[in-house]
Each structure stands twice: as structure tokens, then as C-alpha cells.
Amino acid sequence: MNRTRPNNATGRALHDLEQLKYALDQSSIVAITDRHGVIEYANDKFVEISKYSREELVGKTHRVVNSKYHPPEYIEGLWKTILAGKVWRGELRNRAKDGSDYWVDTTITPLLDKAGQPERFIAIRNDITRRKELEQQKDEFMAVASHELKSPLTSAKAYVQLLKQLERQKRSGESVSLLAKVDEQIKKLDKLITELFDVAQIEAGKTHLEMAEFDLRELIESVAEEVQLSANSHRIVKQVDQLPLIQGDRDRIGQVVNNYLTNAIKYSPEASRIIIKAQAKKGRVRVLVQDFGPGIAKEEQRQIFKKYYRSNGGAQKYVKGLGLGLYISSEIIARHRGEVLVKSEPGKGSTFGFWLPAAA
Ligand code: ADP
């Protein structure tokens, strides 16, 4: 490439563009296609990663490197975006000529004609295969590790229960209370491991739901009772209407109710009351858990359902946690085609809730 800059303006502009292209070719995989996605230009990095020759790429569509990994809706979404003249960004798994797959972080920019219609597309990609491999290893590790941690814990829990029963019969008060403490610690550990396990399953797309029709009101009553048993500090007030049957995984929905209630208790240590409400509305049901704690700032309300998110505000200093409970809850509700919600006013408390469709 000519590195000296010409004197006239047009020459300089062209030269600058050429330099920009040179720099881009060093860093990224670049392809230019026509409006139908037929490749007109493929740079060296594209040739290198796809293991096809330039001649094998030009004149074809990106179907040559399609790995069939993504669901059709994903690719349809991509096309819909760029045909509407908008930039599409996302990660794609492609297949090279030798059958090996590679991952690319992709930005596709449509170039529009005078009528505002896409004329050509420029795809700029970066190889993220290594990062994806590491992520997959991490997901597999999490799944194995949480499973391995959980099984001895389950046995220990059973032994403690047994010992507690035996000790109770002997009426030796002190060891019963010690065992109760051990039991409590095991339960905490169990909860943490279960959360890690659930996240590993979600990441791997392997959350299994046991779908059946069930009575949500009865479920709420029983979860609230169970939570109340281990919460002396708060009274759980139930305002649960008669509800239509729900089609879903009873245990998983129970897990969400449990998560909302335990959070409400954990994060409102100064308060003494929690309200759980459930109502049927237009073919849907809504469950709300209200607390009278410090609440959550507006900016944080959007973040709160994200993985690992823990508030920087006042609430989380009371208790330790992994910041996974709400993430898992929102995934469970989404899998039931429902929606989670949070309303909160700092100083007044928070209300966490979800909508679920009633069984047809
Ligand atoms: P964890 O409780 O393990 O940190 P969660 O995902 O259940 O994880 O909650 C994420 C964060 O949301 C918490 O760390 C806390 O800061 C905030 N939060 C959740 N529930 C409430 C609540 N009822 N009141 C105030 N803050 C809450």
C-alpha cells in the first residue's frame, strides 16, 4: 500500500479510505454482499478462517458457512433487521470447509440506496471461538461441580434429620439445638448449590419443566406456610383470591414464590410484615409479594433480574447472596410464557411479582 499522502482533496480522501480498509482487513473478517446476500467481496481473514478459497466464496451466499446451529428464527431476525435498514449485531457459529465450526462476533451494516432500501451489506466479524470454548467449558464445569457438591450434601442432610429424631427421643435439648444449627447451615449451602445448578442448566438450555395443571392458590398457601415456619421476624399476610388452574411446573413456580418471599424477608430486616397477593385477571393470574423494606432505586430496578446482579444500595449489606435468585426466577417465568415485574419506591418498600397465563 502507498503510505505517502497525496496533495489534492479527493486523492487524500481516497487514500484515507484505503488506509482505513487496510487497518480493518488487519483486524477483522470482512465480507460485502449484494442485497440478496450474495458475496461480492471476501477479505483474506474470511478466506483464512472459512478455509474456502476466495473463488469459492464470491458469488455464493453465507449459506456456505452455515453451521445449522442457530434456530431459523435467529437467522430470520437477522434478515428482518438488515432488510429494515438497521444494523444487526450478534454472535454466529459458522462452519469452515473442513467441517470445523468457528464463532464470530458479527456486525452487519446495510448500505441504503437513494430510496432508502438496502443495496449492499457489509459484514464485519471477529473470531471469538476461543472465548466460546472457554464459556462452554465453564458451563460444563458448573454443571458437574454443582452436581458433585450436591450429592454429599443431600446425604449429610438426611443423616442430620435422622440424628435429630434420635436425639429428640432421648430428649437431649442441647444437641438438638446444635443439630438444628448444622441443619440450617446445610440448608444455606444447599440453596447456594441449587442456584449454581439451576444457572448451569439454564445456560446449557437444559432446564427441564414437568408441566401439569395445578392449583396456584394452594401452592402459594403451602410455600407461604413453609417460609413462615423459618421466619420469626415477619408475619406473612396472605390475600389470595380463588384462581383458575395453571399449566406449569408446580415446583418451579413454587421456587419463584419462595424466592420472592425469602428476599422480601431478607431485605426488610426492620419491617415485620410481608403481603402476598394473587388475583385472576383476563385469562392471566398475577402474584405480588410486597415488603416494607428500604426499596430499590429506579436505575437498579432494570438490573435486578440480571445474572449475578446485587444492589450497591442499602439492602444487600444485610445478607450475602450470589445474585442469582431473581435471574433464575425470571427464567422460570419466561419459560412459562409469563412476565416478572418489580415496583419499588425507595424508603417505602418493594413489590415483586409475576404474571402467568391461565391454563386454556
Ligand atoms: P441474592 O438475594 O442472592 O443477592 P437475588 O437475585 O435474589 O440474589 O437478588 C438480587 C438483588 O436484588 C439482591 O442482592 C438485592 O440487592 C436486591 N433485592 C432482591 N429482592 C429485594 C427486596 N425485596 N428489597 C430490596 N432489594 C431486593
Image (cartoon, helix red, strand yellow):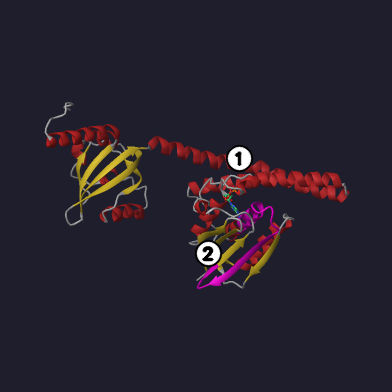
| Residue 319 visible at all | no
Are the residues tagged 1 and 2 within 8 Å (C-beta)?
no
Q: Residue at x 69, y 60 (%)?
A: 273
First-in-chain label (1 vs 2)? 1
Q: Secondary structure at mark 2?
A: strand
Q: Tell which of 107 and 94 is nearer to you.
A: 107
Q: Residue at x 11, y 33 (%)?
A: 8
Residues in magenta? Answer: 257-285
Q: Residue at x 34, y 54 (%)?
A: 72
Q: Residue at x 61, y 49 (%)?
A: 315
Estimate the x, y position of residue 229 in percent, counting from the top left: 73, 57
Q: Which numbered marker is on residue 355?
A: 2
Estimate the x, y position of residue 116 in percent, counting from the top left: 20, 56
Q: Quadrant of the N terminus?
A: top left
Magenta stretch encompasses residue 237: no
Q: Secondary structure at mark 1?
A: helix
Amino acid identity at mark 2 = Trp
Q: Which residue is mark 1?
A: 148
